[in-house]
Image (spheres, coloured by chain):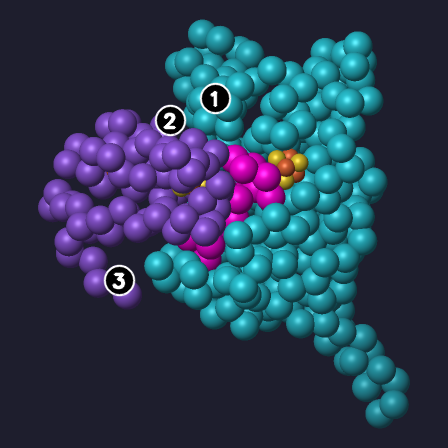
Chain colours: A cyan, B purple
Amino acid sequence: MPIKDYIRERFFPHLWCSGCGHGIVLNALLRAIEALGINKSNIVMVSGIGCSSRISGYVDFHTMHTLHGRALSFATGIKMSRPELTLIVPMGDGDALAIGGNHFIHTARRNIDMTAIIMNNRTYGMTGGQYSPLSGFGTLATTAPYSNIDHDFDVVELAKAAGASFVARSTTYHVQQLTDILKAAIEHKGFSAVEVLSQCPEYFGRKNKMGTPADMLEHYKENTTTIGSKKKQENPNLLERGIFVQKQIPEYCSEYDKIIEKAKKAVEGKTE
Amino acid sequence: MPKLKLKEHRINRDWCKGCGICVQLCPKNVLELDDENKAVAVRPEDCICCKLCELRCPDLAIEVITEDEKKP
Ligand code: SF4
Ligand code: SF4
Ligand code: SF4
């Protein structure tokens, strides 16, 4: 399997639980990168903390496992100093949108060229299944045994409002669509935000009685639809999948280069 | 596209965690879990080589090898 060329086989079988969606995200991401034919020495993956962030240990790219919520900030530093590299930043929902929420909106606003993948399993898996900002009203969690009274974010709406120039959503059931979206996101010049609904059978699934890992995948099939479909008109509660935003606006590193040129000219003008 | 012909399902028993995703979501009911909770292809003749099992496996444990492919 050619995708095996992109992983650190010595760390397999991986640490994720049986049926964890994060492994499917890894699977789809490897196929996207293989299809794009990017040299693995030109890819940097930066992750924060959480079950999702383990992903950086398994890929044979340049990898950094950093601080909770701060992956985008480390990635920004790398991209600013080496803009020719491809930056991929997988994050969990708590990682990206609770402790890292501020970094998320401002990285989106700047439109720096990198791909943020929000692996949304609606819980803090690594620390024992506490509710996250994506769990949603009325769900159960170890810290919400009588049901959660927090409302959740709509990640797509949030990314759009923050100014991300590429915004998409898919699920671990829709692996072919997910691979295509990841390809488009990585190729996009600017900040790409991709939300992936990814099951945590161990906590969110068990607490909310969602059945087997495959049942959880089927739940994604039943509760989502393609953007603007007829099904969505008939049932507004369905969550849409696909590419919501894909636009070209000035990219941060390119604009920074222009500033350097301008500043150089200004200094030269003075010294002449 | 010419119809793909199955050569074999290559299942890495050390990596498979028996999650059952491939078993439950195979459109042709080709796969089952054995006594050791590992995926096995029990009805390979029914396989349509859609490769969804390979794409959805969280553990990169299953590969569908077709006749035309040269895979090591
Ligand atoms: S706790 Fe949940 S998210 Fe973490 S590895 Fe297990 S299934 Fe995956
Ligand atoms: S999906 Fe993968 S890990 Fe799960 S049972 Fe099938 S081969 Fe094993
Ligand atoms: S390739 Fe398709 S039909 Fe064949 S075993 Fe896998 S999921 Fe089933």
Q: Is mark 2 within 8 Å of ligand 2?
A: no
**What's the residue at 48%, 46% (across, down)?**
B59
Q: CA distance from mark 3 to mark 1?
A: 32 Å
State yes or no: Cβ of the residue under disc 3 lies below 8 Å from any atom of ligand 3.
Answer: no
Residue sitting at x 67%, y 27%: A203
Ligand 2 within 8 Å, label 1 CB? no
In the picture, which quadrant includes the N terminus of chain B?
Answer: top left
Which label belongs to residue A202?
none
Farthest residue to the top: give it: A234
Q: Is residue A175 located in the magenta-colored stretch of the structure?
A: no
| Residue that label 1 marks | A215
Q: Secondary structure at mark 2?
A: helix
Asked whether A123 or A167 is in front, the reply is A123
First-in-chain label (3 vs 2): 2
Q: Give residue A149's quadrant in the image.
A: top right
Q: Which mark is residue B24?
A: 2
Q: Amino acid at mark 2?
A: Gln
Above or below A206: residue A73: below
Q: Position of residue A161 (x, y in %)?
A: 70, 33
Q: Residue under circle 3?
A: B71
* Mark 3 surroundings within 10 Å by alpha-carbon count, few (fewer than 14), some (14 through 19), many (20 or more): few
Which range is magenta? A16-33
Q: Chain of mark 3?
A: B
Does A250 appear above or below A151? below
Looking at the rendered structure, the secondary structure element under dot 3 is loop
Q: Are the residues flagged by discs 2 and 1 in contact, CB closer than 8 Å?
A: yes
Asked whether, in this view, residue A163 is left or right of residue A2, the answer is: right
User: Which quadrant of the figure contains the C terminus of chain B?
Assistant: bottom left
Give the amino acid at mark 3. Lys
Expressed as whole percent of the image width and height from the top left, the position of residue A93 reads 70, 36
